[in-house]
Amino acid sequence: MTQRDELVAACDQLLNVSRFKDYTENGLQVEGRASVTRVMSGVTASQALVDEAVRWQADVLLVHHGYFWKNEPVAITGMKRKRLGALLGSDINLLAYHLPLDAHPELGNNAMLAHRLGLSVAGTLDAPMGEGLLWHGQLKRPSTIAELAAAVGQALAREPLLVEAPSQAPVSRVAWCTGGAQDMIAQAAAAGAEVFISGEISERTTHMARELGIHYLAAGHHATERYGVEALGEWLKQRFGVEHRFVDIDNPA
């Protein structure tokens, strides 16, 4: 039987968590039972996902978006109390990895998105000074921006929001970062990308894309970050022989 601390240590080492300056605590956020046979994964530790973990009698709930974000209220009241109460009442461990899971070269959200979209990876644009979160590469063949948007929508089962640049020439050079990375668009454009893909869009992003001359695809924060945590759960299944189940709680954002 796998011990929780052994499983957590393996994840921490795999994802190199000490390298990151994050907005939250990476690793074990809520301690539950010491032995692990069942791991449930999902994008966000919402009440709906916690309830699924309780019903399935999971030992570990593994997520990308956990709790204890910087600058959030510290009081354990209301929604936070209900979520934590359900985890503690069922002795379920909450294991969360944010930026380390975005950046991992094989199992991370950026890596899995590239695989999903058929992008060849050339490297990162914010390393070595950054944390390797902004990736760039090539399409397998040049395409129109409309064709690329349709392909992204099909791959993620969610129609992306497209902001078109003035040029309608075929595109091949792409930069991407999953989730709420819309402000990396300036860095992507400066590096010569013709298209930037992330999850969220802000009001300013539209004007930046048009004025910088780079196409922008907002493919959904949740939709772009489904695959890393599922891959990490499958890695744990292979490494430790635990049972793994990924649960997708729908989120249109």
Image: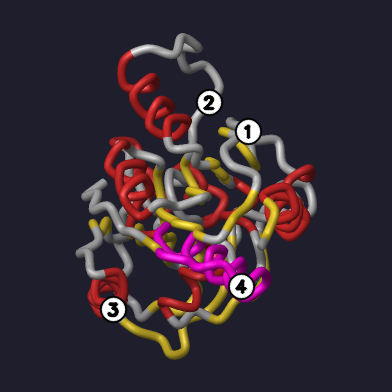
- The mark closer to the camera, 3 or 4, is 4
Disc 2 and disc 1 in contact, CB within 8 angstroms? yes
Cα distance, mark 2 to mark 4?
30 Å
Q: Which residues are magenta?
A: 225-245
Query: Which residue position is annotated with label 1?
Result: 25
Q: Secondary structure at mark 3?
A: helix
Residue type highlighted by circle 3: Ala
Element type at mark 4: loop
Q: Which comes sooner in the sequence, label 2 or label 3? A: 2
Report if the CB atoms under discs 1 and 3 are less than 8 Å apart: no
Instruction: Residue at 46%, 9% (x, y): give it.
Output: 75
Q: Position of residue 183 (x, y in %)?
A: 47, 42
Residues at badges 2 and 4 in contact (C-beta under 8 Å)?
no
Q: How far apart are the two marked residues, 2 and 1, measured between alpha carbons?
A: 7 Å
Q: Quadrant of residue 123?
A: bottom right
Circle 2 residue? 68
Earlier along the polypeptide chain: callout 2 or callout 4?
Answer: 2
On residue 151, the disc is 3
Tell which circle, 2 or 1, labels the residue nearer the N-terminal end. Answer: 1
